[in-house]
Image: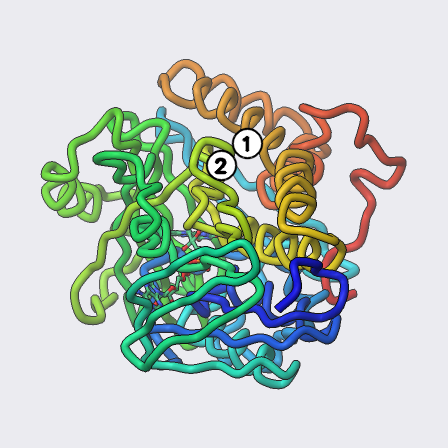
Amino acid sequence: MSETGRSPGSVLIIGAGPSGTAAAIELCRAGHQVTIVDKATFPRDKCCGDGLTSGALRHLDHLGVHPSSVASWKPVTDVRITRPSGAEMHFPLPRGPGQFAATATRMDLDAALVDQAIAAGADVRQGVTFEGIELYDDRAVVTTDDGVTTADWVIAADGMWSPTRKALGLAPDGYRGEWHAFRQYFSNVSERAANELFVWFEPEILPGYVWCFPLPDGRANVGFGVLRSTHRTQEMAGLWRDLLTRPHIAEIIGANAEPEGTHKAWPIPARVGELPLTAHRLFFVGDATGACDPMTGEGIGQALQTGMGAAQAIIEAASPAEAASLYEASTDAELAVDMRFASTLGNVLKTRVGAEWSLRTAGMTGWTSRNFARWLFEDYPRAVLGTPGRWRKDLFTQPGAYS
Ligand SMILES: Cc1cc2nc3c(=O)[nH]c(=O)nc-3n(C[C@H](O)[C@H](O)[C@H](O)COP(=O)(O)OP(=O)(O)OC[C@H]3O[C@@H](n4cnc5c(N)ncnc54)[C@H](O)[C@@H]3O)c2cc1C
């Protein structure tokens, strides 16, 4: 294969989660030959809160994943946040046009993304595990448990532990993510839990929080996340039992709620710009490059965005060096600045006083409540505060996704 990326070349993507499939769809649309390998067989579960921000929704809309193709899709219009003092606040999202927040199980969402990648023309090889990689001037050679594949480009979309990063000797020693989070599905939850989205800022876990996100059929995704710098993972099982019995949380989940199976826990990497983004003709995307939000731990929107960003760099560049600099520049412009801003705000939420003050301020008037909810779920308005250069006239009036 030639060194230039202008004529459509072959791309091997490791991982078929949101970041890998988003990259695949964009590349197939531009005429590239795309193969994805994933060790899992879809539909597969992924430990997650299942919350979709406006940013994630806009990307899914662009990628052609329609809510009707995701069985557990549930639009969210009302957010309830409880301050450390115990006061509950109501933050309504705009009533349209379009959707500003939604939930969908990762079992369903990721399977729909895989279907969309296949429909776009990607060859998705499920149940195939990545084993090793060699990067040459003119190609990459990837070994899986199914054989050896040569490609012009590689995208590592293989999640938090990124075996590709490890195989290349680029994994930082002892790195285990910035956050650690627990998730448990419940069925037969209360009417409120089945329809509204709850977040509790409990004093002992700040800036972490407990969530209860609604799903169809009387189900909810309940969990909590803490910073690794403030909590040891060994304490988390005890904390989880304690949090679930707190009356204000137990009441919302509902007296008749039934846990489905056992809870799961998984790390959340929020370090974009500090983990490697590129290695010659290889691009790290999503959790593999630590792209989660340092304040909220959300990462689906960022996974989709980095996947599309890497794809765009491959589509536009004339050489690996140019592709790397295009991808680095787009990640910095679209994500890293927002992340630094979110990190600063995360520091305010670390203390009880800071969390009380910021949530009280957000709920001062109807306008601030409506726009705070939007601000929480929409990446763009938050980013603009950190980067006034991106201010647009329709900042608070832009319609939601699928409008
Ligand atoms: C408890 C919890 C709650 C969260 N809640 C939210 C939320 O509500 N909203 C939100 O936006 N984000 C949330 N996140 C973050 C979100 O889950 C991730 O940011 C997102 O899944 C990243 O997508 P990805 O495509 O980069 O990686 P993944 O979704 O992890 O996909 C990686 C893929 O790589 C495959 N893979 C791994 N190793 C190999 C191998 N050796 N060979 C082949 N394939 C391999 C895996 O099977 C997997 O399919 C949460 C995370 C956690 C842990």
The residue indicated by pointer 1 is: 339
Q: For the point 63% across and 24% down, which residue is it?
A: 364
Q: Secondary structure at mark 2?
A: loop
Q: Secondary structure at mark 1?
A: helix
Tell me where residue 141 appears, x and y as whole percent: 43, 66
Q: Which of the 4 image quarters holds residue 352?
A: top left
Disc 1 to disc 2, C-alpha distance? 8 Å
Along the line of sight, the residue nearer the viewer: 278 or 114? 278
Q: Which of the 4 image quarters holds residue 377?
A: top right
Tell me where residue 222 appears, x and y as whole percent: 32, 55
Q: Quadrant of ligand 1?
A: bottom left
Q: Is residue 343 visible?
A: yes
Q: Is residue 374 visible?
A: no
The residue indicated by pointer 2 is: 272
Tell me: residue 271, above or below residue 27. above
Left or right: residue 391 compared with residue 342:
right
* Quadrant in which the N terminus is drawn: bottom right
Label 1 is placed on what type of residue? Met
Tell me where residue 140 appears, x and y as whole percent: 48, 62
Q: For the point 40% across and 14% down, which residue is it?
A: 353
